[in-house]
Image: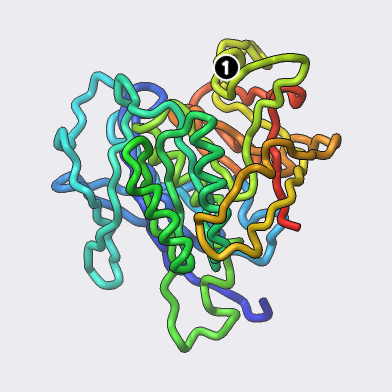
Amino acid sequence: ITKPISSDTIYFRTAVVITMPNGGSGVRITSLQECHNKRKAKMRMGDFEISLGKTTVHKACPWSFAPRCRLVGYYAAATITSTAEQEVPLPPRLLDYAEVYDERQDAWKRIDLIDGRSPPVRPHRLAVCLQPVYLMADWPLIPMFFESWIGNGATIFYIYVHSISQEVDLMIKLYEAQADVQIIRVNWPAVPSTEADDDDLNPNNRMYRTEVGTAVNDCILRARATAELVVSSDLDEIIAPLNLKDRNETLFCIIDEYRTRKLKKGLLPGAFLFRQSYAYAETDWFSISHPSQLSFEAYESVDYETKVWQRGYRSKVIYIPERVFRAHVHDVVGYDGKWATAVIDSSRARVLHFRQV
C-alpha cells in the first residue's frame, strides 16, 4: 500500500445476544473497521436502543504478520443486563434482525440478529465452522471434509462462503438435503466498494484472507446456543485420535477426560488445543469428473510426519463456545471468565493436515 488510508467506515456483520459470564445478557456484533477507528455506533432491537463500545477481535491491530492489512475484525459490544436477576428488556423471541444507526445518512440499517443465549440443553454435541472458502472450485474436498467430521461426531456445520463454483455449491447441497446433519450457510462476501476505488483504496485489498479471524469468532458466537463444542477447520485437515499403543478412543473420549483436568493455577479448560503434523495420502481426485468416482480407500492408511508443530503454528482448537471471548485461527486469545487452554497430548490426537500434491 503506497497511499495513506484513513477511513472511518464500519462494516457490520452479525449481532448475537449472549449470556454474560455473570449471568447477565449482552450483545456482540462482528464488524470490520480500520485500526484505531474512533467512530461510535448504537443499535436497536425492537424498541430497545443501546450504545456500543468496541474492541478488536485480536489484541493487536493490525496483525503482526500482516502489518499492511489494516481493515480488521472488531467487536461492537454492549451489556444489556449486568446480572441474571435483572429483567431483560427484550421480547422472549427475538426478531431475525437488529438495526445500527448511520448518523451521516440519518438512517437505521438492518443486520442479522441471532439469539446466542445459553439454553439448558444444546441440541448438538459438536459444531464445525468451515473457514471462509473463496475462489473454491475443488469439489472433491467437500465430501472428505464432511465425512471426516461426521465420523468425529459433528452434527451441525457452519459453512462460510465467499466465492465458490457451481460444482462446490452442488456438493454442499447434497449435505444440506441430509436429515441427520444440519448445514447453515453464512454469506461472507466481499465488502462494498466502488469502481472508482483503485487497488489501494479498495477495502477488500486491505484485509487478510477475507478477515478469516473475524469469521472464526462470528461462528463461535453463533454456536453458543447450538453446540457444546465448536471447532474451526479448513477443508484439508482433520483432528484424528491416533489410537497408538492399542488404544481405541474417540475424539469425545479424549475431550471428556481432559474436561475435568485442572490446569495452570487450578483452572478448568475453556478450550482444547491440538497440535499439527503434515499428512499424506495419494488419491486420483484430480482426474475424476463425477462424484460417483470418489473413493476414500487412500485414507485407510496414511503417512504423517514425525514432527509435531508447536502450539500456535497450524494448531487447531475445539472451543467450549460460551467460555471464549475471542479466538485466533490457531489458538485462544482470551476467555469470558477464568478458564485455561488444555493442550492435548500429541501421541493421542493431533491435526492431520493433508497438503495436496
Q: Is residue 309 positioned above or below 96 on the image?
A: above
Q: In this view, does 271 lie to the left or right of 166?
A: right
Residue 207, x across and y down, in percent:
57, 64
Residue 342, x across and y down, in percent:
65, 23
Quadrant that contains the C terminus: bottom right
Q: Quadrant of residue 111?
A: bottom left
Q: How many marks?
A: 1
Q: Residue at x 42, y 54 (%)?
A: 172
Residue 118, x across and y down, in percent:
33, 27
- Return the residue found at the far front: 293
Q: Could one spot residue 39 in this view of the protein?
A: no
Q: Could one spot residue 306 in this view of the protein?
A: yes
In-front residue for pair 231/304: 304
Residue 4, x across and y down, in percent:
62, 77
Q: Residue at x 30, y 25 (%)?
A: 119
Q: What element carries label 1?
A: helix
| Residue at the disc numbered 1 | 253
Q: Is residue 217 positioned above or below 89 on the image?
A: below
Q: Residue at x 27, y 46 (%)?
A: 50
Q: Quadrant of residue 349?
A: top right
- Other residues around mark 1 within 10 Å, as few (<14) / some (14–19) / many (≥20): few
The structure's colour scheme is rainbow
Q: Is residue 339 positioned above or below 55 on the image?
A: above
Quadrant that contains the N terminus: bottom right
Q: Which residue is drawn at 42% across and 51% down?
A: 30
In-front residue for pair 159/60: 159
- Amino acid on which disc 1 is placed: Cys
- Return the residue found at the far bottom: 196
